[in-house]
Each structure stands twice: as structure tokens, then as C-alpha cells.
Amino acid sequence: MKRKRADDIRAMPLTEAAYVLGISYLRAEEMVRSGSLRGVRVGNGWQVSMAQVAHWAETRMGKPKETV
């Protein structure tokens, strides 16, 4: 069984992921619901893998925005 790296486990709220990807929250939520961006429902919001957001941004949009 493959061990997960720490980067694979770290997550961010979907609102932050949408900002990093340069898309609206509604578009990001649509991506999670369709399965193109994996997310986990936590309470009334979504959490997504930071590694997956970075990978998605690099492969589809170029370099991701710097977070503050």
C-alpha cells in the first residue's frame, strides 16, 4: 500500500482553493461535485487537497497564485 505524503493530507477550504485557481467558488464547487477536483464535505463546507489544487493549477492553468 502506498504511503501518503504530508502534502497529500494537508487540505484547504474550497473558498481558498477557488482563489488560488482563479475561479469562482461556484465553479470550484461544481468541479468538486462533478469529480474533476476531489473534495471532502466537512460540516457545511468543502476541503480539498492542497497538493491536488497545486497540480490542477500547474497542469491546466500555469503557475498557481501565491497565497498570503
Image (spheres, grey):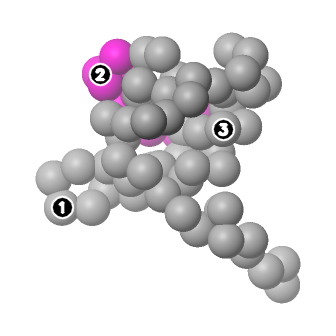
Residue plotted at (49% across, 34% down): 67
Residue plotted at (38% across, 36% down): 16
Three-letter code, disc 3: Ala
Q: Give the range drawn in magenta.
A: 24-36
Q: Position of residue 13 (x, y in %)?
A: 35, 47
- Give the residue at mark 2: 26
The answer to whether residue 58 of the structure is visible from this angle is: yes
Q: Where is residue 45 in the image (x, y as percent from the top left)?
A: 23, 49
| Residue placed most toward the observer, 6 or 31 | 6
From the viewer's perspective, tell me whether residue 39 is left or right of residue 9: left
- Give the residue at mark 3: 54
Element type at marker 1? Answer: loop
Three-letter code, disc 1: Gly
Mark sitting earlier along the chain (2/3) = 2
Element type at marker 3? Answer: helix
Residue 25, placed above or below residue 42: above
Three-letter code, disc 2: Leu
Residue at the outermost right position: 2
